[in-house]
Amino acid sequence: AAGSVIYASGFFTAVGGTPRNYLAAIGTNGVLQPWNPEANNLVMTIAFGSGTVYAGGAFLAIGGTPRNRLAAVDTAGNLLAWNPDAGNSVETLAISGATIYVGGIFNTVAGVARNRVAAVSTTGVLQSWNPSLDGPVYVILVDGSTVYLGGLFSNVNGSARSNLAAVDSNAALQSWNPGTDSTVNTLSLSGSNIYV
């Protein structure tokens, strides 16, 4: 949400009978807004920061302009130059300051090896942050300098982690290691507790 507007993404092609391909903006009063970026395929995740809606998913274009699974659109519906180019589907985004953490099933971002997670600046520059996972990441939660990852993986940076992990802002694996026996889809922070 941004003020009185809620941004939505998913597998839909209409909202209230009006065409909207995978992205839409709806007022808190329930009225569909004119914002209409027109993704050409599924948008799995969005994140809002500084007047920009960042989108990730399986799409290859926004409004007919090529964007491989990552894009940024302003609140007027204009596609922005931000174009990190993920090599496969993006499942989750998390914003921390001027950094956007990206998770999914990709093995490259901007043509550079990144196994399931990456960090991209709000100006579109791929960052050096590079923990390497052997399976999909479905959720990223940032708490200060700690980045929590959830998904369906068994190791991070070559160390055993069962579907949950924490890395710092330098991509160093942390000791936090609760593990689960199957897929993690969402995480939520409350005080010093993380709900899985």
Image (tube, helix red, strand yellow):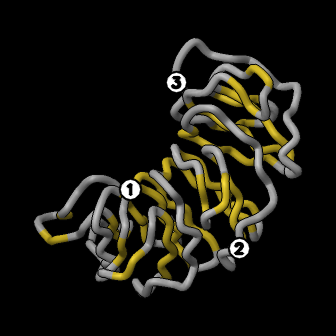
Determine the image quadrant of residue 190: top right
The disc label shown at residue 183, or none: 3
- From the image, tell me which residue sits under label 1: 58
Q: Measured from the top left, where is residue 101 in percent x and y?
A: 67, 56
Q: Measured from the top left, where is residue 184 in percent x and y?
A: 55, 28
Image marks 2 and 1: residues in contact by CB distance under 8 Å: no
Going 48% across and 59% down the picture, which residue do you hit?
Answer: 56
Q: Is residue 145 visible?
A: no
Query: In the figure, is residue 102 to the left or right of 72?
Result: right
Q: Is residue 56 visible?
A: yes
Residue type, mark 2 in image: Val
Going 66% across and 19% down the picture, which residue do you hit?
Answer: 162
Dot 3 falls on a residue whose secondary structure is loop
Marks 2 and 3, Cα distance to the nearest angstrom?
Answer: 30 Å
Disc 2 crowd, CA 10 A, few/some/many (<14, 14-19, 20+)? some
User: Vertically, is 63 above or below 46?
Assistant: below
Going 66% across and 60% down the picture, which residue do you hit?
Answer: 112
- From the image, tell me which residue sits under label 2: 125
Dot 1 falls on a residue whose secondary structure is loop
Dot 2 falls on a residue whose secondary structure is loop
Residue type, mark 3 in image: Thr
Residue type, mark 1 in image: Ala
Q: Measured from the top left, where is residue 136 in percent x and y?
A: 54, 36
Q: Name which of mark 2 and mark 3 comes first in the sequence.
A: 2
